[in-house]
Amino acid sequence: MLPPIATAFFLLCGLFRATIATKEPHASACSPKKFKSLSLENIEIISLNVTANRNFSTSGRNATGGVGVIPDIPGVETATVDICLISLTYTHPGQHDLINTYIGLPLDENKWNSRFLMHGGGGWSAGGQSSILTPVLLGYASSSTDGGHGPSASTADWGLTNHGQTNWPALRDFSSVAISEAAVLGKLATRLYYGTHARYSYWHGCSTGGRQGHAMAQEHPELFDGIVAGAPAISWDKFAPAGLWGPFIAQLLDTQPPLCVVEAFTQAAIAECDALDGVVDGIIAYPGQCQFEASSLVGQKVNCTDPNGTITITEKMADVISAVWQGPVSEDGRSLWHGFHYDSSLGSMIGTTCTSINECTVVPFPISEDWVNVFLARNPSFGVNSLTREKYDQLFQQSTDQYSSVIGTSNPDLSKMKKAGTKMLAWHGMADQLVPTNGTVEYYERTTELDSEVADYYRLFLAPGVTHCGFGSGFDPAETVFDTMRAWVENGTVPDRLEGVAVAVGNASATRTGYLCPYPQVFTYVGGDVNSASSFTCR
């Protein structure tokens, strides 16, 4: 998947680092003997390795995040950390799975801030050793898991059994089982090492990590005091096959527009609808009011540089773009899932590779392609070219019928979370190009239908102009959202606003600050300097 946010987790601005007045455990305390009782009733441990590491380098150990990999961050990639590193490999007897869990503890007790933090995965990666390093660097105890397969493993290698059927234990491990077990093991190891429980426990993730956070909120909220879930890939059973809608329509219409044409539609829509919110800043803050028609560009010429040449927009090209904006529909016209907002870059949903301006091949969204080929068709060589109109509808229905309860992560009943006293703060960029924003909105609305007081423990913030898990020209809250969650949990400071930072209007090298609104309130311009936070309010 595309590289996602680079700052959603590493730059947790202003983190309070509490210390405790007690003796430092020596490196010798970080030993297998210390963790001899580290286990769970339903697992069989294959191996347990414990090492004390001084000046353990975080360089080259990128953490998964969003739906791809968070690159090294200046000032962090050269850091070293003193860490008690625990690697645990285990299986669930009779299920033929193999899970690797990693636990990191600040080696010296006076460097521990009395808190536990897990960081979510991305794409098909549930997490891994890299995901625990920055939390430990920042003073947290942490754990993570590979979910039963390595980050580079082919989906077909773990998603199907030797008999070509769905590997249900492996999918459940990835979906939530290994995540909750990593939390229990990590918190147990924390107690064994420091002799006390973590004062507060947190989850922080985006995309797959956001879905994992919702899974914990729905199934095991007692494990965390606070959950931050950005751009959550929830309703996976619908989101995943929906991502193949654009390539399917493209092959159905036999048209494969190069990226320059796809971007021309996006830029035209922004030009048409940008001013609807009162500010011309390249952001469509009111997508519901945008009535732009892709067909209005038919006949226009686009000058491209990669591939080089000029191409005329056709009616079929416009139909493909309209389909992606609308979202998948069944043959009889029923909406199957949400589409994308007009200012979302569609290069991932209708990607192509071209040898010339008129010779392009569609490149499907990898997660969706894997899902359809491996888990639905159960044939890794299936491919979008094998789809017919009837077959697409059939596979979409199969996805919801067979997988909703396993990986859908869309149960709106958060009564267990309410009872546990857990808080969840979700946020989603409105220009997200991978996970449709309205899927998260729909989920939140369903939770409010069940509990009118859901905002007491679960809040959703929408970020205009922000792409998947961060970036874009809009008000990105990635660097402040975790602090906001901690203040809610530890101080009772209810998040009525969420600070976001955007590119300044008229000066691309400067920034402006805005305060995002809890849904259903809308971030609204009320007049004045567009680069001033006081010019916006929530209505």
Image (cartoon, helix red, strand yellow):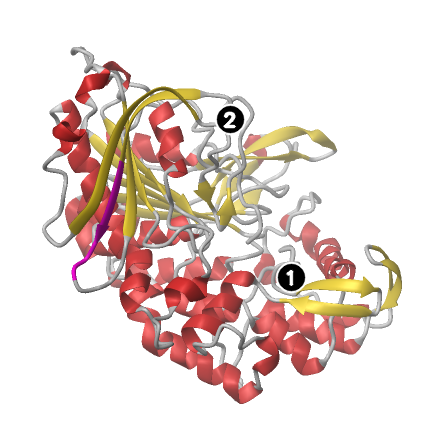
Identify the amino acid type marked 2: Glu
Judge from the rendering whether residue 225 lies leftward or rightward of residue 6; answer left or right.
left
Q: Is residue 7 magenta?
A: no
Quadrant into which the N terminus falls: bottom right
Q: Residue 453 versus residue 474: which sits nearer the camera?
A: 474
Q: Residue 214 versus residue 373: which sits nearer the camera?
A: 373
* Residue at (56% x, 47% y) in the render: 464
Marks 2,1: beta carbons within 8 A: no
Residue 390 appears at what percent x and percent y? Answer: 52, 88
Tell me which segment is drawn in magenta. 87-93
Judge from the rendering whether residue 350 lies leftward or rightward of residue 300; answer left or right.
left
Residue 409 appears at what percent x and percent y? Answer: 33, 61
Per the image, the residue denoted by label 2 is 77
Q: Residue 33 versus residue 142: which sits nearer the camera?
A: 33
Which element is circle 2 on? loop
Residue 242 appears at what percent x and percent y? Answer: 51, 70
Q: CA distance from mark 2 to mark 1?
A: 42 Å
Per the image, the residue denoted by label 1 is 290
Please tell me how crowded label 2 is: few (under 14), some (14-19), or many (20+) other residues with Cα within 10 Å: some
Locate residue 236: give its quadrant. bottom left
Vertical side of 293 occupied by 73: above or below: above
Q: Residue 200 versus residue 109: which sits nearer the camera?
A: 109
Judge from the rendering whether residue 473 lies leftward or rightward of residue 498; answer left or right.
right
Magenta-colored segment: predominant secondary structure = strand
* N-terminal-most mark, 2 or 1: 2
